[in-house]
Amino acid sequence: MLIDPPVRLTESALDNLRLITFPEPFLRVGMRGGTCGGTFVLGFDTKTENDEEYLIENIPVIIDRRELLFVLGTEISYEVQGNGFYLHKPPKV
């Protein structure tokens, strides 16, 4: 059974991530600061025993199991005119 990854990388994010030499083996997506009013986290890290691993368009991504529900549906994009990478969770319809 094929399971879709819990986050989505836009083409702009994929293009820019492919240009980066990762200082750690994985791209970490997460949530910090609690469930209400927390902030998204994007960075490079090593895998721990609490992490789920995904390969999204050949980008190795890890997410802590405890944060999966909070980042589910998050879209990661890259804005050239902005400050780089953005994490956005679209509202449920």
Image: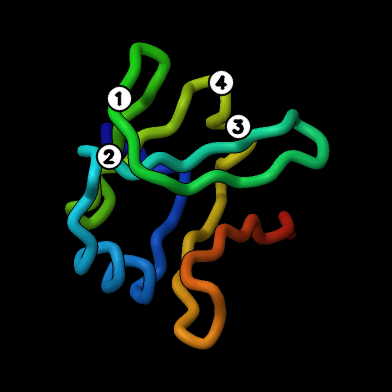
Any mark on residue 69, and which?
A: 3
Q: Residue at x 58, y 41 (%)?
A: 71
Identify the mark nearer the N-term, 4 or 1.
1
| Outermost residue to the front | 23
Which residue shows up at 73% across the image and 58% down it? 91
Q: Which residue is mark 4?
A: 66
Q: Amino acid at mark 3?
A: Leu
Three-letter code, disc 4: Arg
Tell me how far mark 1 sits from mark 2, CA to CA.
7 Å
Mark 1 vs mark 3, foreground winner is 1
Q: Give residue 54's position: percent from left, percent from top.
A: 29, 38
Question: How far apart in space, not on screen, are marks 3 and 2 (Cα)?
Answer: 20 Å
Give the mark nearest the N terminus, 1 or 3: 1
Residue 21 spot, x, y in % from top left = 18, 56
Quarter occupied by the C terminus:
bottom right
Residue indicated by mark 2: 26
Q: Which of marks 4 and 2 precedes in the sequence?
A: 2
CB under 8 Å between discs 1 and 2: yes
Q: Are marks 2 and 4 in contact (CB under 8 Å)?
A: no
What residue is shown with label 1? 47
Give the side of residue 42 with respect to residue 11, left or right: right
Q: Say which of marks 4 and 1 sits in front.
A: 1
SS label for mark 3: helix
**Could you say whether the residue bearing mark 4 is in a helix, strand or loop?**
helix
